[in-house]
Every structure is written in structure tokens, then in C-alpha cells.
């Protein structure tokens, strides 16, 4: 059992080293992509659709209190890189009628799969007979780099996202905020409605 644990630790350490080698180039590509106005507009557009969905489902009589931009680890293992957008009232996760939609920011999945292809090829040359559980552990660990990058993108796009929701005439509470994090788990507030907007 100790040997298995040692192998797992060595494997993840090697994977992290390879990811650190690859990730900066991928990030530069994504930064250049999202420096373009059209890419930013396309990334923010789905949030207006979510706001309209909220208005339709609530009949326009309920204010939205927060927007969650959430990832699901189970999807990452299935190579499904859509995030879950959740617009909720003041009941937060206990809201029985949240508006939900899937969102996949362009470019991230392709870059991640290229990086994973490179990393797994290198690891298979060093670690014989990698099992599925080991590959999944590597995928989950490497995904953390991309989740951090998507969180940063969401922070950078917060103004555009808020603008899209405002253009859809979303009724919001005074303390309306966005958070990025795990679906129905922990998250970090990345934008809060300013008093000047009220």
C-alpha cells in the first residue's frame, strides 16, 4: 500500500512539473484571444440569456441576489468542460427556482486537452501501466490550473457580464454579487454591485 501511495505522489509531482512547463504558453494564447473585443462579447453574451430566463421563470416579480459561475469535478473527468451558471434569489442554494444554464468559455477546453495529451504521453513513458484512477488524478490536478485561469477571466469580464445582465433588465438586490467556485460548494466572490449603481 505504501508503494502505491509513493507512486501516486511521484506521479502527481511529475505531472505538476510538466503542467508548469506547458501552462504559461497556453495562458499567453488565451490572453491574446480574450484581448479581442469579439471574444469578450461572445463570452459575456450567455449571461444576458440567463437573466432573461430568470425573468421568465419568476414572472419578473423576484429579484436576483447572486450569480454563481460554477465548475463540476465530475464533468472534468468526463472531458466535459461546461461550467454551470446559476442565478439565485436570497435563499442562495436553497432557492427552489434558480435559473441555470451551461457555459463554456471558448479556447480553454482545447488548450487543456492539448496540455493533457502532452503530459500523459510523457508520464506513460516514465510510469508503466498507468491505471484509470491515476489518469483521473492527474486530470483533476492539472484542471486546477485552468479553473484558476477561468476564475481570472470571469473577474476580468465582470463589467461586461454585469452590463449584459443590466441590458436584459434583470431586477437585482442591492447586494447582488457574482461568485466563482464549486457547484453547490465553496466559492469566491469576484464582483459585487457598487453603491453608485443603486
Image (cartoon, rainbow, N blue to C red):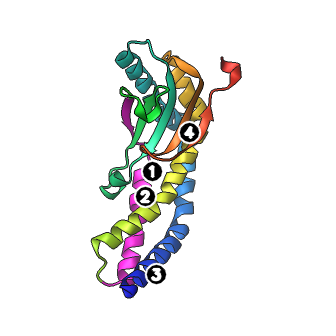
Disc on the earlier residue, 2 or 4: 4
Q: Can you tell which mark lies on residue 10?
A: 3
Kindly give the residue lying farthest to the right in the view shown: 196
Q: Nearer the viewer, mark 2 or mark 4?
A: 2
Per the rendered image, the range of residues in magenta is: 99-128
Give x and y (percent) for residue 23. 53, 62
Q: Are marks 3 and 4 in contact (CB under 8 Å)?
A: no
Q: Nearer the viewer, mark 3 or mark 1?
A: 3
Give x and y (percent) for residue 173. 56, 21
Disc on the earlier residue, 3 or 2: 3
Q: For mark 2, what is the residue?
A: 112
Q: For mark 4, what is the residue?
A: 36
Q: For mark 1, what is the residue?
A: 108
- Within-10-Å neighbours for mark 1: few <14, some 14–19, many 20+: some
- Within-10-Å neighbours for mark 4: few <14, some 14–19, many 20+: few
Mark 3–mark 4 Cα distance, whole angstroms, equals 40 Å
Amino acid at each position: 500500500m505504501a508503494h502505491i501511495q509513493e507512486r501516486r505522489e511521484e506521479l502527481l509531482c511529475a505531472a505538476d512539473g510538466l503542467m508548469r512547463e506547458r501552462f504559461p504558453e497556453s495562458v499567453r494564447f488565451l490572453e491574446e484571444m480574450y484581448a479581442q473585443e469579439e471574444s469578450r462579447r461572445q463570452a459575456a453574451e450567455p449571461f444576458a440569456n440567463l437573466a432573461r430566463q430568470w425573468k421568465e421563470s419568476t414572472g419578473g416579480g423576484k429579484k436576483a441576489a447572486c450569480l454563481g459561475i460554477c465548475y463540476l469535478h465530475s464533468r472534468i473527468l468526463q472531458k466535459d468542460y461546461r461550467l454551470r451558471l446559476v442565478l439565485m434569489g436570497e435563499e442562495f442554494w436553497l432557492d427552489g427556482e434558480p435559473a441555470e444554464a451551461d457555459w463554456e468559455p471558448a479556447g480553454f477546453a482545447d488548450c487543456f486537452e492539448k496540455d493533457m495529451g502532452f503530459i500523459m504521453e510523457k508520464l506513460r513513458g516514465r510510469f508503466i501501466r498507468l491505471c484509470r484512477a491515476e489518469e483521473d488524478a492527474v486530470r483533476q490536478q492539472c484542471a486546477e490550473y485552468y479553473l484558476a485561469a477561468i476564475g481570472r477571466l470571469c473577474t476580468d469580464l465582470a463589467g461586461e457580464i454585469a452590463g449584459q445582465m443590466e441590458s436584459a433588465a434583470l431586477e437585482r438586490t442591492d447586494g447582488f454579487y457574482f461568485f466563482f467556485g464549486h457547484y453547490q460548494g465553496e466559492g469566491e466572490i469576484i464582483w459585487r454591485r457598487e453603491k453608485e449603481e443603486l
